[in-house]
Amino acid sequence: MPDQDKSKAQLIDDLYELRRQLAETAGAAHQQRETFTEVMLTLTSKISLTDVLDEILKQAHRLVPYHTASIMLLNNDTLRIARWQGYDVFGSEEMVSRLEQPLAEFPMDNEAIQSGEPIVIYDTHLDPRWVVLNETTWIRSTLMLPLCLRDHIPGVLRLDGSQPGEFSIDHAQRLKPLAGAAAIALENARLFEAEQTARKQAENLRTANLALTKTLDLDTILATMLDYLAHLVAYDHASVTILGTGESLHAVQHVEKLKISSKPALKVSKNPLIRKIIKHQKTMLIPDVAADPRCRKSRYPPRCQSWLGGALIAGGRVIGVYTLDKARPQFFNEDHKRLAEVLAAQAATAVVNAQLYEQVRAGRERLRDLSRQLVDVQEAERRFIAKELHDEVGQALTGLRLQLEMVAKLPDGANEAAGPLVKAQQLVDQMMMQIHHLSLDLRPPMLDDLGLLPALLWYCQTYTEQTGVQVSLKHRMVKNRRFPPEIETAAYRIVQEALTNVARHAGVRQVTARVLASERTLRVQIIDQGAGFNLSDVLKTNHRRGLNGMRERASLLRGQVEIESTAGLGTQITAELPLATTTVERTI
């Protein structure tokens, strides 16, 4: 009986112990469910990828206290560290920040991804799956937890210890519920980040298009293209080359700073990849330059590990090529290729517009030069004719008058011809006066000899004597100052034409003329309070060529003429002529 009682008591104790263990297990399970629910709620409340990664490391430390941990994300069969903690204590901070682990070269990582199950290595020195790196020799134990989402594994959580046996299967089981929640949170963050990235890319493309269409300067267009490419595709080095006949005509390079050069950035004839891009009009993407046989015939600098090249196409023809490179293999992808193509299409349109504008501008400049030369020729002809009239014809008439005077002094036998001789002398005097005025009107010598102000003072005096219209000439910073000959000629002719129009059409007895000079501009104003006119109607008619002539003279010197007139209220003509940086001063 005592043995039976003892056995019964033992059974009761065992039953109580089993109940206690069940209660502990149920409590642990309940606690685990609550923890998992809390982890799920916490993780899924995060949207930013950085916040999600930080929260995963925080929750992992709550479940399994660690000294060092990292989260590695899977991309193209390569694990790259996205977030880490604690490695700086062991001097591995720089290594961790750039660590990439291709699955083919790291058996433990590959096994975890393939199986989807956690892996615990009690001692890295004894496990053949562990790959030893110089910077990670201090790691003696590790726990790798794949973050599983259905049949997809976006990354892994890894805990590292400096002593053997710091992690166990029990730790892995504790962390396992975290894997699902972390994977869901990572997927949500990636989707959100992808949406944000797409919005940002679309906004960058829209802004780039606006920036490209705001300018017609080729250098600015190419610099803008490279600037926005840097926002869309984070390259290390890029170049854009505009093609001409055969070889490149213009190039832009972007290394650490923008450099614009007339020398070609790309030797098209010596680069088979560029020739292929031009021939097929397609973008080429080379993830790993060192491993690609197409790059063997072309010499690439050591910095170039990943390469992207494309064409600027307009009207079905290649007008330029661009290249991007990165000092990291496998960097460029199809998204980068697509974004570069969209931006290149926008830039190609802007380049064509800039080239067309440059052609029109060059044509206008040639026309401006020809017009300026024509004006110079006209003034030279005026000067020549005025000189010929004054010297040759004037001298001939002077000789004729002397001859007539000699005839008039003959003996009285010629008295019957005295009347006609006097008339002839008067006619010669009139002709000499007319030729003198005509010579001065064509080109007053004092304009060349003395300058603008003396010529205008003489002209205004002569004008008043001939027309009866009083001219009030006001001037500032013009006295004792000479301007470039073309400026003086244009100002004189504008005043001459304006005063002629006043005498013909204004119907006034007084007019004001102003000549005002500054360091950069010569301003001429003619103001009357006369009849005035409707400017738009007058400019449509052909008989007011004088107004258009004034504008053309100013335009040839990159100046402008502004005409303000109202019927019955008078007219104001203002001409502004830009001056060179220096003018000649002399005493008149």
Image (cartoon, rainbow, N blue to C red):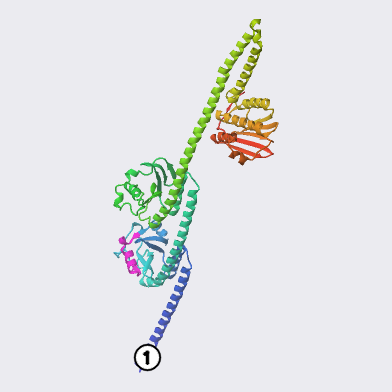
The part of the image, by quadrant, that contains residue 189 is bottom left
Residue 344 x/y as whole percent: 42, 51
Rate crowding at label 1 as few (under 14), some (14 to 19) or many (20 or more) other CA atoms within 10 Å.
few
Residue type for callout 1: Lys
Could you say which is closer to the camera, residue 380 or residue 580? 380
The part of the image, by quadrant, that contains residue 84 is bottom left
Residue 546 x/y as whole percent: 59, 33
Quarter of the image for the N terminus: give it: bottom left
Viewed as shown, does residue 88 lie left or right of 271? right
Q: Which residue is mark 1?
A: 8
Is residue 480 rendered magenta in the image?
Answer: no
Answer yes or no: is residue 481 visible. Answer: yes
Is residue 109 rendered magenta in the image?
Answer: yes
Answer yes or no: is residue 222 visible. Answer: no
Residue at 45 percent of width and 59 percent of height: 198
Segment colored magenta: 101-122
- Residue found at the far bottom of this picture: 1
Could you say which is closer to the camera, residue 398 or residue 242? 398
Could you say which is closer to the camera, residue 240 or residue 432? 432
- Residue found at the far right of this picture: 509
Residue 130 vertical position relative to residue 550 in the rendered view, above or below: below
Residue 196 vertical position relative to residue 410 in the rendered view, above or below: below
Q: Secondary structure at mark 1?
A: helix
Q: Total label count?
A: 1
Viewed as shown, does residue 217 lie left or right of 493? left
Residue 379 vertical position relative to residue 316 in the rendered view, above or below: above
The part of the image, by quadrant, that contains residue 395 is top right
Quarter of the image for the C terminus: give it: top right
Could you say which is closer to the camera, residue 426 or residue 350? 426
Residue at 65 percent of width and 32 percent of height: 504
Residue at 57 percent of width and 15 percent of height: 396
